[in-house]
Image: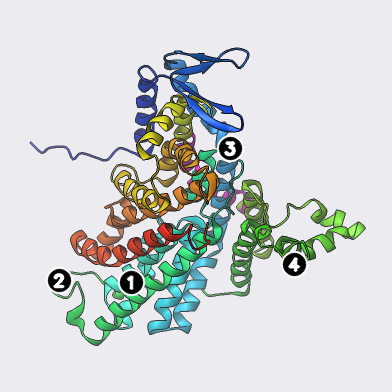
Amino acid sequence: MSKKKSKMLSAYSIVFIFLIITAILTWFVPTSVVVSNHGVKEVIYNASFGPNGEVLQGAGYNPAGIWDIIMAPITGFNKSSEVGIAILLAGSFLGIMNYVGALDAGIGHLLKKHTGTSLIALLMFVFAIFGTVFGLWEEIPAFSIVIVPLFVLAGYDVMTGLGVLFVGATVGNMASIVNPFSTGAAIGAIGNPDLSLGSGMFLRIVLFVVLYLIGTGMMIKYANGVKADKSKSILSDLTDIHTMTHDEKKLPELTKKRFWSLVIFICIIIALILGYMPWYQIKLGDGKTLQDIVNAPINFIGSIPFIGNLTGLKHMTPFGDWYFGEFSFVFLFGSILLGFVNRIPEKDFVREFTNGAKDLLGVVLVLAVANGISVLMGSKTFGISVTFVYWIQGALQGIPAWAFAVATILAYMGIGFFLQSTSGVAGITMPILGAVAMALFATSKIGAAGGQILLISAFTMGLNFLNGLYPSATSMGTLALFNVPYDRYLKFMIKMFIPLIVVGAFILSISQYIGLI
């Protein structure tokens, strides 16, 4: 008799199990409250608030029952609605981009115009951008069918093509400058109104640039070594590797419509950076900030009576103050522009728009269930969440920022063994660790928000580092296409990823001392 193969539980099931565990904990963990004592916040252990806001000490437990468990994801969906609509609209835009073939055509154009070292550097940058903007990962198998054979034909090996894809995407995901599935989900789960996708953006841009340069340098060194001497390939002793060069996939041509579709995508990236970069932090000599300069053209157009009303620019959120609503706007507006540029029939546009959103609905549902955990935990001022903060804060009291960053990266690397969903992990952990970071750093140089910024970058780095090594459906499916053993992939990627995580952890550790936070 053959034994049934054990399967890893889905992200939905894992997150819901955590939800049930949280509900059980409410029966055994007392609630606590946060009060303000002469402007200083303090935790009162084993307490609750009375009907008039008075503190009731010795309150005990606030057990959650079946009603609470089932209602929690529904309430969590409401809490995560802004992040959810941003994810769905980003999915709609990407669905239309794939429908018109713009991304494939753009990559095909790069493959025709560049070879060798420049091609590796360019494609690494492209996939890193895809990772840092929308969390490229599940799309890798489709891209590999095109990328890997072309690198083999150019004199490299299969692992060079795989490395460009996986290392490039991991670099982008570890930095996650404006990635709604990781950075956005974390900010939404923390629930601090003082945080937006612009918070800590300068730190994440520095991480992106440094990690990209390191990753690209290592890839070029390996690729050039293999091209000069095939025995240096990590796959050199394997005879059954599938190069797929006999069945090379042809990419679509870069037509004028696809070119302008790519321009729209590039403009969206620029708009997101402009919108979320905290320009107001850069002071000018005349009492103004750089935000006034950046927004001057928009303000001028908006001040023109008819044009300002027609465009609505007089109501536009200034660059530097954007939040999830503006993120949703640019992707919705971008989708509409794609429809006009490519002259997509209304029926086809609606179909592809909804299909793109449907592909990411699962992510939104995971985020909703994960936020349901924070509902059962309580709020920032009441519940077992405050009790956990009280306990963890006591254990970490006095820990320096650099140690907190390193410990958090290691913690998320461990969490990644059990759950690879960035949005799910954010929803589970950020309500607690976000409050811990706020409490630990409230009186420090970087402040409460700075501590949470440090936490978010440690989360994206640690979890995505592990995700790049984990035998997920994406990595194993891609390796199966080329018959590459997982142990060879793991050996290669560990050599690539360890310098990335070490340098990234070092940057986070010194970030508060060099003005990155």
Q: Which amino acid does label 4 sit on?
A: Gly
Residue 162 occupies which quadrant of the picture?
bottom left
Bounds of the magenta segment: 349-368
Residue nearest the observer in this picture, 59 or 215: 59
In the displayed orientation, state which residue is furthest to the bottom: 228
Q: Which residue is label 2 attached to?
A: 238
Q: Earlier in the sequence, mark 4 or mark 3?
A: 3
3D distance between C-alphas at marks 4 and 3: 41 Å
Mark sitting on residue 81: 3
Helix, strand or loop for disc 2: loop
Mark sitting on residue 161: 1
Q: Which of marks 4 and 2 is nearer the N terminus?
A: 2
Q: Give yes or no for contact between labels 1 and 3 (Cβ–Cβ under 8 Å).
A: no
3D distance between C-alphas at marks 4 and 1: 50 Å
Residue 179, percent across and down?
51, 54
Q: Which residue is label 4 attached to?
A: 285
3D distance between C-alphas at marks 2 and 1: 17 Å
Q: Which of marks 1 and 3 is nearer the N terminus?
A: 3
Answer few, some or many: residues within 10 Å of disc 2's Cα (few below 14, many 20 plus, some between 14 and 19): few
Mark sitting on residue 359: none
Q: Which amino acid does label 3 sit on?
A: Ser
